[in-house]
Amino acid sequence: MHAIRGIPLISRPSRSSSPAPTSSHVNATGTVTSPSAASIPLPPDGKPRSRSLSRQVADKLAPPMTITPSQPLKKVSPPSSRTATPRVPSSPLPSDPAPGSNMEVIGLRLNEVVNKACAGVDYKAKKAFRAGAGWSVGEAIIREFPAPPADAYLLRAILRTAVRSLSIYLNRLESLLLPAVTDPAFNAALGLTGGAPLNPTQTFAVSLAHTAWETCEKLEQTIELGTWPRFAEDALRPSMDKFDLIVGKVVKPLLLSLKNELEASLARTEGSPKLGPSISQMPTVPMSREHSNQPGSRLVKESSQAGHARQMPVPACLQHFAARVDGARRVLELVAAPCQHDGEGWTTKVVVAVVWTGMRQIALRDDVAVTARPPSPGSVAKALAGLSKDMQPPAVQGHLQTSSISGMTSKLANGLSILPSRTASRPPSPTRRSPSLDLASQALNVLESLVKRLVGGLVQPPHAASAGAASTQDQQAEHIAREALAEAIEALQSFRTVTQATHAPGASARLLASVRRLRDDVDDEAEEALDDAAEDLPAVVLFSTLLRRANAALAGLPVTNEKTPEPLRLRGPAEVWGWQRADFENKVLAGFLAAEEWGARVAAALGPEVERVLAELVAYAAAQGSKPGRDVAEATEWVKALGVALDARAGVKVANVA
């Protein structure tokens, strides 16, 4: 027991070198036999070498090893070599991988989504992005975000991985965008009058812009939910700004080209197309093409009580615009409509500019018609009679007087654009019902119908539910765009109401009473439509309308300026300031916003002019001694209406306007 207790079982020293191996013999049965103890040579002292107790025990307990003939013998290691290290079975991987390997997996997944989104896109072959490719990239990035509240370090790591994938995605988009926007075909004119509205290069660029917008919109919607920390937006914002830049490089040039072409068509009157598209004033009436022998297109209106469709001819000043409405709408459907609330804003900018340009062009043509109005037929007949008496012998005066007056008044009557001839020398004409609208009001009515056809369904009413906007900012943007378009159409309707009132009988007294009610804040149910129109119309437009009417009335008076022999007239703001007409139009008449901003300055410039002209009219009436005629009274009412309007809309007080 003492010997066993002294054996170091746990930490025994290194064992001594083993003796050289001896040869073994395999008998016929396959048993390996070792040489006997007698055959082992003895040491020099003649005594057998003692063996350790542990080895003796092992030799006694180990059975003899048998090897089948089919198994080869194992090679025995030399004594001096280390023993073979036993093979340790591999332990299973942990259920949660390391953070580094997890980010690599996320990056691979995102890169695969980017590759799928860009698969098959080729600029040379004009193979565009498939629909919804941008949404798939944005949704894949959002899916990798951990559910809030999440660990800040984990979220930062995922954001860094997502930004790297977005950088690869942006590089591919930019590499495809550069050849598209530098191609001359991208800046080619839009096909608004026939054929495809966009050429293949423009179509490819639009698909690329839509893809970038979809990805940016998805990221924007996620950020604006407010569930992620501030650093998430800071990490994604540079990539989102690049997406917006790509969208702007494609959308802005196309919509600017569309706006310029529509505005240019409103300014053209020569070479009007023989037949434009049919235009429906009421959105519920089906649209159809009507063939007519007349050179102008016709506006299909609602059915009358007899069941026949009533029509209104499109004026010559709107023929070119009417021929491009359908093509322009198709461009807006392809470029702006897929971008939801942003598309509504883009469409509103184009349409509002078109409405303002149309109002200006129609007002300009109405101004020409008013200022070119000839004198009354009675004064023409009196002047021609006096001229014929002075130049012809008495024998033929009677005959030539009748023929000359008849011929001249007939020519003047044929040249009138708005007012019918009132001369008695004109031969009687068949009974004809006078039109309910003058040419300017009719043109404004047709313009409103064309605008509604252009934008109908692309921009929702102001109080419609916001289906596409997921955030408060998007809803506010939608509301602003819809309100701007509604106000532009309302201004167009107000301008039509005021213009129609200025062409009606007794217009001067009616407009003067309307602006007085507006100044004194008095309601009149019978004239509510006119009062609302005078209040809603931009101030500069109202002042310009009354200024044109006042000068047209003053042109027919035998009153001259005190300093110059020119006819009495009101100077416009451009003349007062010493501006060129082009400068005035570019600054003051640039748009609805500019007109509102310059309203007070225009009123301040017109106030002294109104006072000066009124003083001269009073002096002329006093010099006559008798009661002034109807022409003088009408001109005075127009000038006073302008003065009261300056006070009602801009707060500029004018003397002697009551």
Image (cartoon, rainbow, N blue to C red):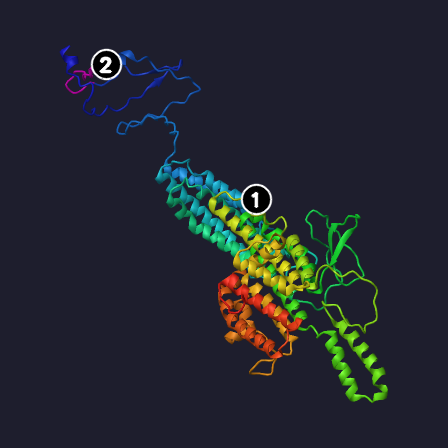
Residue located 51% across and 54% down the image: 246
Q: Dot 2: what SS?
A: helix
Quarter placement of the N terminus: top left
Residue located 66% across and 68% down the image: 365
Q: Dot 1: what SS?
A: loop
How far apart are the two marked residues, 2 and 1, measured between alpha carbons?
101 Å
Q: Is residue 438 left or right of residue 70?
A: right
In the rendered image, the vertical position of residue 627 relative to residue 349, given as above or below? below
Say which quarter of the image contains residue 6.
top left
Q: Which residues are magenta?
A: 42-54
Residue 201 in view here:
no
Few, some or many residues within 10 Å of mark 1 (<14, 14–19, 20+): few
Q: Amino acid at mark 1?
A: Ala
Say which quarter of the image contains residue 625.
bottom right
Of residues 266 and 171, the one drawn nearer to the viewer in this rendering: 266
- Residue 74 screen position, x and y as percent: 37, 24
Q: Is residue 616 left or right of residue 157?
A: right
Label number found at residue 464: 1
Residue located 24% across and 13% down the image: 57
Q: Which one is in front in this view, the residue at disc 2 or the one at disc 1? A: 1
Which residue is tagged 2? 56
- Residue 144 screen position, x and y as percent: 44, 38
Say which quarter of the image contains residue 314.
bottom right
Magenta-colored stretch includes residue 456: no
Q: Amino acid at mark 2?
A: Gln
